[in-house]
Amino acid sequence: METVLKVENLSASYRKNTVLQHVNVNIDSGSLTAIVGPNGAGKSTFLKTILNLHPSLTGSVSYFGQPLSKVKKQVGYVPQRGSVDWDFPTDALDVVTMGLYGQIGFLRRPKRSHREKALAALEKVGMSDYANRQISQLSGGQQQRVFLARALVQDAELYFMDEPLAGVDAATERAIMSILKELKQLGRTVLVVHHDLQTVQDYFDHVLLLNKTVIKHGRTEKVFTNENIISTYGGNIQLLKEGQGHVVHTLH
Amino acid sequence: MFKKRGMLLSGLVATILFIGGCNNETSTNEEEGAIQVVTTISQIGEPLSVIGGDRVKVESLMGPSVDPHLYNATQGDISTIEGADLIFYNGLDLEANMVEIFESISKNKPVLAIGETLSEDKLLEEEPGVVDPHIWFDIDLWKLALEAAVEELKKYSPEDSDYFNDNMESYFAELDALNEEAQEQISQIPEKHRVLVTAHDAFGYFGNKFSMEVIGLQGLSTEDEIGVSDINDTIAIIKEFEIPAIFVESSIDSRTINSVIEGAKSDGIDVELGGELFSDAMGNPGTEKGTYIGMYRHNVETIYNALK
Amino acid sequence: MWSILSTSNTQWVLFSATILGIAAGIVGCLSYWKKQSLMSDALAHAALPGVVITFLIIGEKNLFFLIIGAAISALLGAFFIQWVQSSTRITEDTAMGMTLSVFFGLGIMLLTVVNRTAGGNQSGLDSFIFGQAAAMVRSDVNTMLALAFFVILIVIAGFKEWKLYLFDPSFAKGLGLSLSLMNVLYTTVLVTTIVIGIQAVGVILIAALLIIPSVSARYWTQKLKTMFLLSACFGGISGAIGTAISAIGRGWPTGPFIVVVAALFFIISLVFGKEKGILLKHLQFRKQQKAHSQEIGHHPVFQKEGK
């Protein structure tokens, strides 16, 4: 098992609060990892920081043994849906094509082959009928799928996703998860900030319990225990069915 | 980092204010017992300093190239005004932003709008209801206005009446000579060239006096913004009257007149820049052009040379 | 009447205003999608003290240096806005309002000082505020052409990069697009347009040309490229028609008319615009209302039915 992502002693702040400290984690290739933790635990910040989208205070991050800048093409990112203005005048195909801008090159225009790749990605997420639909007219789930397609079109080795299943319909959830499973079968690595404790065991073979620092990380069956969950959430949860590992996160 | 930048900025501002303020400092060597007279434009101040001689100390708030239509008094000006014995201004809405100040000061001190002492029939009305304030270009009217100011001086210091009267007489004699001189020169300009085109309507009384057609690009007050039609109209008139030259003014941005000249040339109409005239302000104090007579003479000569 | 439109001055003003309108319309779209439309106004106002201070330093009206001074001042304003936002809890629009007032106030104060010194009024620094659109001459046409060329080049060459940068900057960064480069380009293009604009038409008008055409264009299209084109058109046409009207009228100031025409475009777009125009929205709503009430009428629940 090779380590595709090595995070050492990472810390970061957000608006004068330290939201991450002493974060150490190694992600193995081919894993499908859920990052879970309470609100404000730094999950999104963690993702952004290791992607150099947010400044780190300390620590180092290496991808396949190298800094991110050298392996940008191997990394795909699906940000939170709320991070953009969906009123922007563009269509689904256009957004997916943006994923190829790195390949198309500066000052060059997309060619037919690029458009076809983008269309194929849309097809993969079940959105090819919506290729020319304005993104403002898409539902939450459809928008999420467009974002996913945009990442897929990059054909990366390592994918990061920020709450891709939040607020999506069941069909979209199924579609997304089946794609993630497929990626895993292809030997790719996926890290997902996940919002729903209920589905961690069903979907992810690894889990990273994060609350400002790593509480526990490892294979889901080993690490996703009630005890670990309680330490991560600081006692703000209620276990519904003891012993069956189903937990419910109370509204805080 | 802001602290540093902020300090730098405030330091810069303070320095600039200080320099600016320094320019307005008057010499504090007050002649013992001299009457402190404060005026707005130097066209009032300079003649009064001649007539008042060493019995008065005159200070004019608006120096060379200052535009009285737009001028706003500063705290420094207000203290200067408050320290005066007599205050004179043109009135007729020339010093548009200072009217309230004068009205409130007039409760405590003698303040006179010398232009407003003239009877209405002598004044020109550019547009209905709007009086042209640039009366100093008609020497006869200006003599009347200055006389009104001197009356105030005499009232304030009756023991100097004779002194003032003598000075006024000799000064007015010079003015009369100037008047004749101007009349003669201007009449030598061929009639069809007797059109005076300037940046704004400051020369109404001048034109009226010397039978010259007067056209200002900007209207009576420099507060107005011109339109393309103003420029086109001016060029049309230049073309129609075959005017050889037009003039910029010392207190106004020359850009508008220059665009008239450039536009006219581009349309094949030959017109030159006749020179710079003093309209609302005079030249530097202490120079020939800093005196009313010198300023007037300069204007007449410039106009004559350009249009003859 | 038409001969009025063919005089050299009218043509110079016409072309300058039109080209400036086109350039401002394009740059305005960038600001619109950066959600920083008010920034153009703030920066235009922030440029004033730079102009005056430069004049005080060099002592004469050298347009080249005055423009540089304006640019520096505007950039300082931009930094100030950024700094206030990042170091305090103040929001962006408040920061912009503050900067606008402080810088502009400083500029006015300095202008008062300048206007009391010899040569002050002659420098025409006042015209940086309201502009003297009518006094534009051939050299202004050339300047505007250069500006427009510069703007169009930068926007067209990297159009897809702009699209990405405006839509999803984080993703852009992830792909390797240098956000700092884009920010610098954006600021450069914006400040250049502003300072070249204000020396000709003043602070008020340049802000209007930067904001109104792009907002108006939004009401007509759902395609980004079309929005840029429309915005350029609206800006250019406002310049042209505003100039034409002021040329035909008697003593009508040019600058204000350009703003009025632009505003008219906006109102027409607001009401009749194909996308989200008020009229269309209203008509659509009525149509839906009608369809809906017919539907309800036929809904089984409302049918009289013996149970």
Image: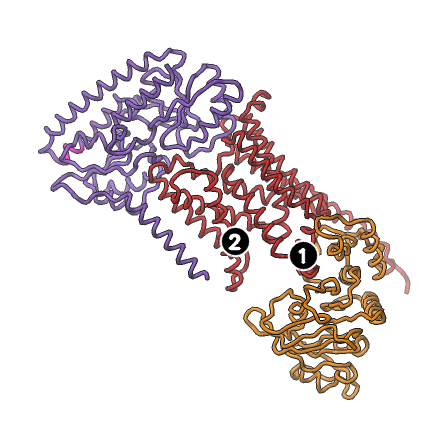
Chain colours: A orange, B purple, C red
**Residue B86 locus on image (x, y percent):** 20, 38
Q: Nearer the viewer, residue B173 or B248?
A: B248
Please provide percent x and percent y for residue C278: 68, 45
Dot 1: element:
loop
Instruction: Decide if residue C203 is on the left or right side of residue B151.
Output: right
B27 sits left or right of B230 in the view? left
The answer for which chain carries disc 1 is: C
- Residue type at numbered disc 2: Ala
Residue A250 visible in the snapshot: no
Residue extending farthest bottom: A243
Query: Residue lying furthest right in this view?
Result: C306
Q: Nearer the viewer, mark 1 or mark 2?
A: 1
Residue B202 at x, y percent in the picture: 36, 26
Residue A54 higher or lower than A127, as above or below? below
**In the image, is residue C290 above or below residue A148?**
above
Give residue C177's mark: 1
